Amino acid sequence: MKELFDKISAEFEAFQKDATAQIEGGNKAAGTRARKSALELSKLMKDFRKVSVEESKK
């Protein structure tokens, strides 16, 4: 679970950096990277939910 949390944290940092570059600088490529990170975050959050539910059942 710790490893999954670390992946989520790293992906969110990447998303935040790219989203900021798009918003503040109008960087279109950063927007593409931010959207890709958002999709990956969505997948990781679903995985986290599954693991969290399993852990709570123990």
Image (cartoon, rainbow, N blue to C red):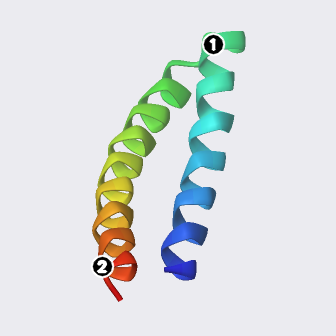
Q: Name the amino acid, label 1.
A: Ile
Q: Residue at x 55, y 29 (%)?
A: 30
Q: Which residue is outermost to the bottom?
A: 58
Which is more toward the observer, 54 or 16?
Answer: 54
Q: Mark 1: few, some, or many residues within 10 Å (few <14, many ≥20)?
A: few
Q: Name the amino acid, label 2.
A: Glu
**For residue 23, which numbered disc appears in the image?**
1
Q: Compute the Cα span from label 2 to label 1.
A: 38 Å
Q: Residue at x 38, y 81 (%)?
A: 55
Under circle 1, the secondary element is: helix
- How many marks on residues? 2
Closer mark to the observer between disc 2 and disc 1: 2
The image shows residue 44 at horizontal and vertical percentages of 37, 59
Relative to 12, residue 38 above or below: above
Q: Mark 2: few, some, or many residues within 10 Å (few <14, many ≥20)?
A: few
Going by the image, does 26 lie left or right of 54? right
The image shows residue 13 at horizontal and vertical percentages of 66, 48
Q: Residue at x 33, y 43 (%)?
A: 39
Going by the image, does 26 lie left or right of 8? right
Which is more toward the observer, 54 or 37?
Answer: 54
Under circle 2, the secondary element is: helix
Which is more toward the observer, 29 or 21?
Answer: 21
Going by the image, does 48 lie left or right of 29? left
Which is more toward the observer, 28 or 10?
Answer: 10
Which residue matches tag 2? 54
The image shows residue 42 at horizontal and vertical percentages of 34, 46
Mark 2 or 1, nearer chain start: 1
The image shows residue 11 at horizontal and vertical percentages of 54, 54
Image quarter of the C terminus = bottom left
Relative to 38, residue 6 above or below: below
Q: Residue at x 31, y 70 (%)?
A: 53
